[in-house]
Image (cartoon, rainbow, N blue to C red):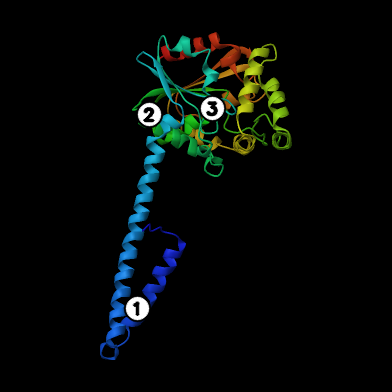
Amino acid sequence: MIITVKKFDYLLIGFQFVSYIRDQRVPLNNRRKNNYISSSIRSFNLLAQTYWLLFSCFQRKVKKKKMVIHNLLTAMNAKIMGSGKETLVLAHGYGVDQSIWDKELPLLADHYQVVVFDWCFSGAVKDPGLYDAAKYSTYDAFADDLICLLEEMKLKSSVFVGHSMSGMIGCIASIKRPDLFHKLILVGTTPRCTNSEDYEGGFELSGVEEIFSSIKSNYEQWTSSFAALVVDPSDPESVEKLAKSLKRMRPEVAFTLAKTVFLIDYRDMLEKVTTPCCIIQTKNDIVVPNSVPKYMQNKIKGETKVEIIDTEGHFPQLTAHHKFVEVIDASLADK
């Protein structure tokens, strides 16, 4: 016999409890023997089902906790390579996967222990059920996943390299668990994408709405046009790589995640970041204006430096990987 706990069980217990209380109000000498036995049975059933309800809830809680913590390494395709005193954790941004770091990995693995992984929205993740639009409507859930992943890999005081949205995810994670991060390297990162009266985010709200509409109406076409827009056009190989990666992401995921990325506002979180930071920015990034790194530098409490790489676009790890690695090396040598 399989017993499940559903809403009906709560109602059943409630009715039994009311019936039990009613029976207890009848004087003992007025109770017939059968009624008394029936009341006792109801009391036993009430107690038994209450214990089963509590036990089932406890089981579900434990199972959920284990699923979140102990399956992330495999679910997120986490890999560790190289050797060195410093551990670098490379986190990709919107629409791509860990292959975005392919050019950097051979160079970094010679000097550092390097971790790469795929976020749950990535087209490289095998289980499509990992991404839940409601859960991941903010960066906090991503930060929690990152913390759990680092805990599972038993990593502490690592250097987190976060591109685009992952930069802010790393900031949030460092606020929650500063012991896990020695330094944050934020690449093309912004706390807010849209403009306001006192802030230049790079996008007007009307432009963001057009992006949402394009993703929803013709995702295939949007991936090609967006890739050509955000990657240096003089590097067609990198443009094509990004376009193919975007196409691997499910359209419904791309749409809901785009709403999260373009509509978040985490400016108030910056002053809570105490971990030392290095902000890497290209000289011309259509996604993140050059005013944003300076804004972040002024707000972040931890010691923060801004490095400008002489390349175009939002993906320096694709278009200027040697310069990108040089900046990382210099940042970690500067202690």
Specify the label residue 124 is tagged with. Answer: 3
Horizontally, residue 113 falls left or right of residue 188, namely: left
Which residue is pictured at 30% across the width and 73% down the height? Answer: 43
**Label 2 vs 1, first from the N-terminus:** 1
Circle count? 3
Q: Is residue 107 left or right of residue 39?
A: right
Q: Residue extending furthest bottom?
A: 30
Q: Which residue is mark 2?
A: 180
- Whether residue 272 is visible: no
Indicate the secondary structure of the residue bearing disc 3: loop
How far across and how far down the image is residue 122, in percent? Answer: 55, 30
Residue 190 position, x and y percent, is 58, 29
Q: Residues within 10 Å of mark 1 (few under 14, many from 20)?
A: few
User: At which x and y percent is residue 148?
Assistant: 40, 34
Residue drawn at point x = 27 percent, y = 86 percent: 33
Residue depicted at 44% across the width and 68% down the height: 11
- Quarter holding residue 215: top right
Q: Nearer the viewer, residue 309 or 65?
A: 65
> Which element carries disc 2, helix, strand or loop?
helix
Q: Quadrant of residue 209?
A: top right
Per the image, label 1 sits on a secondary structure element best described as: helix
Q: Quadrant of residue 288?
A: top right
Q: Which mark is residue 49?
A: none
The numbered mark at residue 21 is: 1
* Alpha carbon separation for disc pair 2 and 1: 54 Å
